[in-house]
Image (cartoon, rainbow, N blue to C red):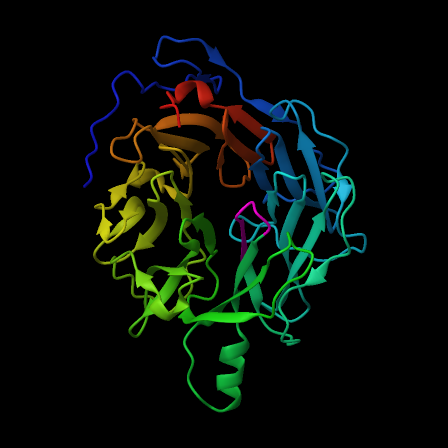
Amino acid sequence: MFSLPALAGLFFTLVPTVTVATGLSASSSTQQPLAVPASKSSRSALGVGVMLDQEGRLWLAKVANQHLLVSRSEDDGKHFSEPVTVTLAPENIANDGENRPKIQVVSDGTVLVTWTQLLTEKYAGNIKFSRSTDLGRTFSEPVILNDDGRMTSHRFDSLAIDGKGRVVVAWLDARDRDTARGKNEEFKGVSLYSSQSFDNGAHFEPNRQIHQHTCECCRTALTWTSEGPVVLLRNIFSANTRDFAVVNLDKTEEGARRVTHDEWQIDACPHNGGSLATDSKGQLHLTWFTNGTAGSGQFYKRISGNLESKPMALGDIDAQPNHAAVVAHGETILLTWREFDGNVYSAKMMFSNNGGETWSEPWRLMLSAGANDYPLPLISNDKALVVWNTDNEGLRILPVERVINRSGS
């Protein structure tokens, strides 16, 4: 099912000034990635949430001075609107790469945001939600989605919409573990819970337990398929094997389907989750990190029904490829990840124009010597961007759609 011939003429070597090819060959013109200068005084967090809406607007959710702020750009990040404060009262908001704010925008202009509010007890948190019905000009008072009322771990939320009014939020939840421990019973890991809305977030249904015994601190990932919302999570198999599984939230009776077999046996949490996307043919595309006995490194695979491709290793193993993300539009698939050569970090990218059957060579897009977030790929009807938030260079936004030869999807 899977072949990996390189797409001819698509590899180039980054020059020292940190440029990226905008054409389809190494001899094409180059451009500097757009950088929004970092403000040292604002104490902005590096972990940001970003998305492209159907009109091609770039949306940004970031944390600064214990507030969640939302803004948008009409010109691929050259200028942003004045940030709107979602959380009027200051709170401790998770903002690292594994647990960043999430944002989605519906075609009618409804803006949805979720985040994890960190509480005073270690690892404790709440899943918070707010929405705007006026294209981000004002936001509703935030609400807590987890309905158990416990001071315990509710973290690593993910957000997905069907664009027709349905909203699903999934997260890792320790309520079942706490209940078991109260009875002196063993409980490995935590559980996956979700809540959903059928009116673009105006009201949410009671929480549902989806799956038990998941890894407790790896990000979840949600994507919408023709068969409903599907979540990717790091699961605990047998004693302590922490490989990945997918669960269809509309078909929970089918249980979790194991989709990686790396046999990573570790009695700890890797704090390194996966990413998931769906293409126009209904294929699932996933990327993940593992250090198992049967596989070690950053990998990608695609799933079509009961067929699964062989895992494809990403990046230079000596440069620690890690924290990859995947997005899809039509049959165009975009992968990004981060590497570190011992001196500087680099944002890397690969893409496919045929649903993951063949891939370009890896492209090195940007460099940073300071603290940085993970590179985030975005794709919509008419554009593709890579967003990388760095401490030294600020928020960097790189248009890459001109390297993607779309297939009319």
Q: Is residue 295 above or below residue 278?
A: below
Name, please, the residue furthest toward the bottom: 183
**In terms of depth relative to the viewer, which is nearer, 358 or 96?**
358
Q: Is residue 309 visible?
A: yes
Question: Which residue occupies 48% across, 85% down?
Answer: 180
Question: Which residue occupies 35% across, 31% down?
Answer: 350
Quick one: quadrant of the C terminus?
top left
Residue 126: x and y, percent?
Answer: 64, 65
**112 in the magenta segment:** no
Residue 391: x and y, percent?
Answer: 60, 36
**163 in the magenta segment:** yes
Total of numbered circles in the picture? 0
Q: Is residue 344 visible?
A: no
Which segment did they paint magenta?
157-165
**In terms of depth relative to the viewer, which is nearer, 236 or 140?**
140
266 left or right, relative to 157? left
Q: Residue 333 falls in which quadrant of the image? A: top left
